[in-house]
Amino acid sequence: MHPINPNNEYNHMTQQEGDRQQGYGLLKGKKGIIFGALDDRSIAWRIALACKREGADFVLSNAPIALRLGTLDALSEETNAPVFPCDVSDDADVEGLMKKTAAHLGGVDFVLHAIGMSPNIRKKKEYNDINYNWYQQTLNISAVSLHRVLHFAEKTGVLNDRASVVALSYIGAQRIFSKYSDMNDAKALLESIARNYGSRLAGRGIRVNTVSQAPTKTSAGTGIKGFDGMYTFAEKIAPLGNPSADECADYCVTLFSDLTRKVTMQNLYHDGGFVTSGISEEMIEDLAKLYSERESGE
Ligand SMILES: NC(=O)c1ccc[n+]([C@@H]2O[C@H](COP(=O)([O-])OP(=O)(O)OC[C@H]3O[C@@H](n4cnc5c(N)ncnc54)[C@H](O)[C@@H]3O)[C@@H](O)[C@H]2O)c1
């Protein structure tokens, strides 16, 4: 702990902010695999930095094409973590990654799945005019990959007893956000796989959860048409506002830590209270004004 002292560097921040920057050693001695860091806006990137701050060692992984397009080497240097390429839609790649990880780290205590991709969204195909091959790819990369990762992690023996697995989800799994298209389906499947695998791994004390994060400005997020509107809508309704990627990282650290040993098979909302809110006063007032202006203009 850093006592607040007018002469020290924490002078201009609260004690909690100072503690957070230093970390709490919550993941000291823990090892993990982090999937999905592409550039420094990626939620997985922020999670990797938070895991490092908390004392963890890990390997970083992403699809070979993403390694060419992204900037993962910089994160690798900063966190002293090797990068192992792996396309999570490919069985052999995932098995190979698990073997390499076992050779490098021994067993792992945590896994982050922060992977999502929809060719239909990228190519602007409407949900009711979907390309079925691309739909399969969306589900395979964004959801079935969690199953595949857990399957090969178990098979290769790399997953330690009492490990913690977190996959990032979105409220599109429960509610329809039209622009999120087939990713709504992928997230529903992802959450179901987390529950099903969670029940099977619980005998070894391993927990599997999804974190349902609010809209966040990243490559995947901003690639969705209408994202800014979804972001603002959530921001206006959530009493605490949208959480940032760094705040998501802090939450995930708690789930990887020993402080959450009996939390499993849950979809955990990290959304500033959006999921249980109706509408904010501010939005009611703004909408009332907007519609009355429209009506009087008609
Ligand atoms: N950004 C948001 O608004 C938001 C909100 C809730 C949940 N999420 C989820 O968070 C996770 C991370 O997304 P992000 O917003 O940080 O964006 P991002 O684009 O930085 O991360 C998505 C990652 O998936 C990887 N990926 C795609 N295809 C892959 C494949 N075949 N094999 C391996 N990796 C592959 C990409 O290379 C990329 O690193 C995703 O699951 C996303 O759905 C994002």
Image (spheres, rainbow, N blue to C red):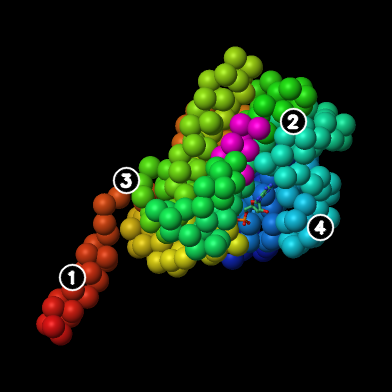
Quick check: is 182 in the magenta stretch?
Answer: no
Given the image, on which type of amino acid does mark 3 rest?
A: Thr
Which of these two is toward me, 84 or 75?
84
Picture residue at 51% right of the left edge, 58% below the top: 121
Q: CA–CA distance between discs 2 and 1?
A: 53 Å
Q: Whole-Å distance between the Cαs marked 3 and 1? A: 22 Å
Frontmost residue, 9 versus 190? 190
Secondary element under disc 1, as helix, strand or loop, is: helix
Give, as a single range, the part of the protein colored magenta: 141-148
Estimate the spatial distance between the alpha carbons at disc 2 and disc 3, rounded to whole Å.
Answer: 35 Å
Which residue lies under the disc numbered 1?
288
Ligand 1 neighbours mark 4 (CB distance < 8 Å): no
Q: CA distance from mark 2 to mark 4?
A: 22 Å
Residue 242: in sight, yes or no? no
Callouts 2 and 3 close, C-beta under 8 Å: no
Instruction: Indicate the position of residue 252 as horizontal and vertical percent values.
Output: 58, 42
* Residue bearing the label numbered 2: 108
Label 1 to label 4: alpha-carbon separation: 50 Å
Magenta region includes residue 146:
yes
> In the image, what residue occupies the spot 38% across and 42% down?
174
Assess whether mark 1 and mark 2 are in contact (beta carbons under 8 angstroms): no
Q: CA distance from mark 4 to mark 3?
A: 40 Å
Residue 155 located left or right of residue 252: right
Q: Secondary structure at mark 4?
A: helix
- Using the image, tell me which numbered label, if any, was put on residue 107: none
Q: Amino acid at mark 2?
A: Val
Could you tell me residue 85's position as x and y percent?
Answer: 79, 47
Label 4 is placed on what type of residue?
Answer: Asp
Furthest toward the top, the residue is: 203
Where residue 192 sits: x, y (%)? 48, 32
Q: Which mark is residue 276?
A: 3
Near mark 1 (Cα within 10 A), the count class, few <14, some 14-19 or many ≥20, is few
